[in-house]
Amino acid sequence: MEVSGECMCGSVKLRATVKDAVYGACHCGICRKWGGGPLLAVECSQAPTIEGGEHIRTYDSSEWAERGFCGNCGTHLFYRLKGENFYALLLGLLDEGDWQFTHQVFIDEKPAHYAFANQTHDLTGAEVFAQFGAQE
């Protein structure tokens, strides 16, 4: 499935292929600090096609990941695993679609003051690291 989207100012446009029209939420402390709440994202197994890449700025948020944003308007664009072909594009960035909310990660870091009603597959931080064969 082909998806596309752009930042608020239109300087960066992204296109990517995703396996399914599903998205998940990340509740880790870094994602919540970055966006002011849980990160809602669509997973891509390869790098998106980017127009306006000269406007993208990245931040190394950990030893294994970086986050990309538009240097002009500040729109959050992606989360990427370094050394992997894994990108998570922010759901709100993408054109409307028939998305299904299927999973949540770092559920053990989710604050008690909010909860989603959807039935999802939930993973703790340790389970996420084990899935990617990484250490915390």
Image: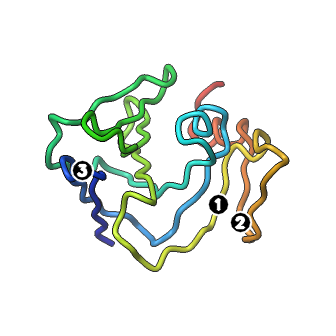
Q: CA distance from mark 3 to mark 1?
A: 30 Å
N-terminal of the pair, mark 2 or mark 1, is 1
Any mark on residue 59, and which? none
CB under 8 Å between callouts 3 and 1? no
What residue lies at 14% left-to-right and 49% top-to-bottom?
Answer: 51
Q: Nearer the viewer, mark 3 or mark 1?
A: 3
Residue situated in front as seen by the camera: 33 or 45: 33
SS class of the residue under badge 1? strand
* Kind of residue at badge 3: Cys
Which quadrant is home to the N terminus? bottom left
What residue lies at 39% left-to-right and 25% top-to-bottom?
Answer: 59
Q: Nearer the viewer, mark 3 or mark 2?
A: 3
Location of residue 103 by image quarter: bottom right
Relative image position of residue 25 (x, y in whole percent)? 61, 54
Relative image position of residue 98 (x, y in whole percent)? 46, 80
Q: Name the outermost residue toward the right.
A: 112
SS class of the residue under badge 3? loop
Mark 1: few/some/many CA within 10 Å (<14, 14-19, 20+): some
* Kind of residue at badge 1: His
Q: Which residue is mark 1?
A: 103
Relative image position of residue 114 (x, y in whole percent)? 78, 54
Q: Which residue is mark 2?
A: 120
Relative image position of residue 87 (x, y in whole percent)? 39, 46
Any mark on residue 9, and which? 3
